[in-house]
Amino acid sequence: MERKKELRRQVALLKTQHKSSASRQSAEILAALEAHPAFRAAKTILLYHSLKDEVDTHEFIRKWSREKRILLPVVVGDDLELRIYTGPEDLAIGAYGIEEPTGALFTDYAAIDFIAVPGVAFDHNGNRLGRGKGYYDRLLPRIPSAYKAGICFPYQIVEEVPAEAFDIRMDGLICVS
């Protein structure tokens, strides 16, 4: 547990040092995401409405919602519910200051083809370190057949992320150098 806290502190420090390149890198990472074969083939995609220190997904969500069914997570207590994204006018500020959709609840987890997963850090074995609340640790086991891609800046890839038995590995990382 202490190793995870230390890793979160290290990455937080790196985020402040790389702030100026975040916008350019976000665009490059999202271009790599939309070129990914699993993304191209997917019809139903779970994305995330990014926080200021994450790969910026806001415009990407709007763009792809015209062609694919986009789902976004909504924090409800200790869990994430999924809702269908219908447009920016249907977003409301939710937990942690994240804009969340107010649209219909989505529970057909088997229909989800692709998941873009945020994280604090990732390693090349697909291990992911989240923010420590366990939201994705509880959600991802319910969606076993979807392709899970960790989305991150280059400085978020570390040599090793401490992994627990319940952690779900990413199928791949979408990052640019």
Image: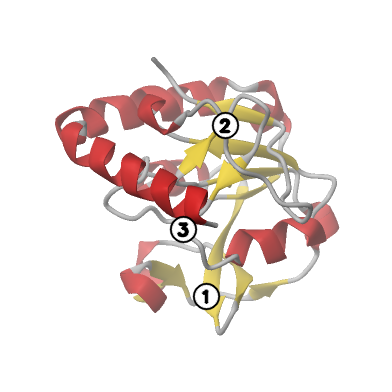
Label 2 residue SS: loop
The residue shown at (39%, 71%) is 91
The numbered disc on residue 167 is: none
Mark closer to the chain start, 3 or 1: 1
Which is more foreground, mark 2 or mark 3? 2
In the rendered image, which residue does mark 1 sit on? 75
Q: Which residue is mark 2?
A: 160
Q: Amino acid at mark 1?
A: Val
In this view, which residue lies farthest toward the front? 2
Q: Position of residue 126 (x, y in %)?
A: 66, 33
Left or right of residue 54: residue 159: right
Along the line of sight, which residue is nearer the eye, 69 or 146? 146
As measured in the structure, the alpha-carbon distance from the residue carrying label 3 to the one carrying label 1 is 14 Å
CB under 8 Å between callouts 1 and 2?
no
Q: Which residue is mark 3?
A: 131
Mark 2 burial class by Cα count in 10 Å: few <14, some 14-19, many 20+: some
Give SS at disc 3: loop
Quadrant housing the N terminus: bottom right
Residue 174, given in percent of the width and then of the height, sits at 53, 27
